[in-house]
Image: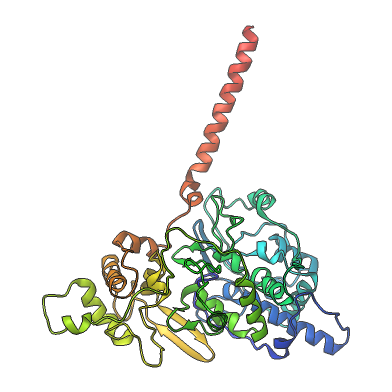
Amino acid sequence: MIGKRGRAARVRYGLGAALGVMSMTGIALAQDAGGDAALVARGSYLATAADCAACHTAPHGGKPFAGGYGIASPLGSIYASNITPSKVAGIGNYTEAQFSRAVREGIRGDGAHLYPAMPYTSYAKLTDQDIHALYAYFTHEVRPVDERAPVTQLPFPFNLRFSMMFWNALYLDNSRFAPDPSKSAEVNRGAYLAIALGHCDTCHTPRNVMMAEIGGKELGGASLGSWIAPNVTPDPVSGIGNWSSDDLFRYLKTGDVPGKAQAAGPMAEAIEHSFQHLTDDDLKAIVAYVRQVPAIRDGADSRPRDSFGVASGREAVIRGAPGTLDNGEKLFSGDCAACHQPGGQGSKDAYYPQLFHNAAVGASTPDNLIATILEGVDRTVGGQHVFMPGFSRGSYVDELSDQDVADVGNYVLTQFGNPAVKISAADVASIRHGGPKPLLARVGGYIVPAMVGAAIVLLALIGLVVARRRKA
């Protein structure tokens, strides 16, 4: 599972009494001081469930919710804004109505449109009560920071924010969450947590040519630039149908299910900043919801991605045989075997995971394996810091070239994972530079010339028609 935006800031927020009071439908709001404190605490919990800190706090010591983190998108970096109650740099002058419009409709207080890197298409489902609690938290509990976040500067024509008006008209469903009467209360609660707050669909649902989620393929897996957010529907081959409810609960709580998967990249951040802090009942509700969504099968998958491979004895064979190792074997022996063990079985305490029966190694696409080698793993859950160094440029361990990463990746795939998957140096270069570009990003530079050309052709046709009529 790979989820939200990719970065490694670590910001913790105490949840206090809020851990027991979140309500999907809202509660009556007391007017006394105690009621206000409970409302703010509930807003804090909701902000955690919505993972607001993941994007609105810059990495490496950024101030909470002050923005400044550049969210990588195929069209360029989109900088998260300052959402502290600062009156000069944040949302301190927002009314609750303006706050609601920004969160649920993607329209700032000054009327400018936000880009859907801010998942307002999911937040549109939030109830009025939860918007009220969030507003109370951000305006009364968050510390104001009077520092403006960098301005997003996308290339023309994507810098024309008003164009989002037309995109929203086509793709924004601005209706509130409505419980499905045919589902249990737990499943409905899980749906609200996963979609309206957690916006799991934002990452795990594939997108069309206009970069909007494709209806009918919810949670079926999607590319997130360098990472893949995999299929998390209950299909037993392409999805997580072979995972037990306890497996899913443990993954959301810790990011680690030995013999299946470990969270890295943006999903590690989602677990670190959001999921690990939710109540057990809320996590179980998310599990209940995910387990009953329509299953989606990918024809490229022949078996579950966590079912490939066995422990290898190759290291024992090649050790002490100079001149017989290819580059991938040398790199694995020097950079990987010390932690993951020569046979790929990982450390005895499972801190370093096994490489066989591992979703990143058995997937039908190698993107997450490549991204993990390049970027490493960095998550703090339950007070434990889980870390693997990256091997990209500037690595303090070993700086690997595109061909090096391809070679060691292919060795790992052959020995422990899906041997049908092959990695080229070009694949690594693509992931290193943000992943494959969608069609809209590739043709963006031609949109304006095409529009100008179409206008010229149209004017020429009009002129031709006018000239013929005059002759007639």
Q: Is residue 54 visible?
A: yes
Across and down, in percent, residue 182 comes to 74, 67
Is residue 116 placed above or below 272 in the rendered structure? above
Q: Quadrant of residue 192?
A: bottom right
User: Relative to 247, is 339 on the left or the right?
Assistant: left
Across and down, in percent, residue 278 comes to 64, 83
Q: Residue at x 12, y 81 (%)?
A: 321
Residue found at the far top of this picture: 472
Nearest to the observer: residue 244 or residue 127: 244
User: Relative to 324, is 361 on the left or the right?
Assistant: right
Is residue 354 placed above or below 439 in the rendered structure? below
Is residue 81 placed above or below 143 in the rendered structure? above
Q: Residue at x 44, y 65 (%)?
A: 226
Q: Quadrant of residue 471?
A: top right
Across and down, in percent, residue 406 comes to 29, 67
Q: Is residue 279 visible?
A: no
The colour scheme used to paint the residues is: rainbow
The C terminus lies in which quarter of the figure? Answer: top right
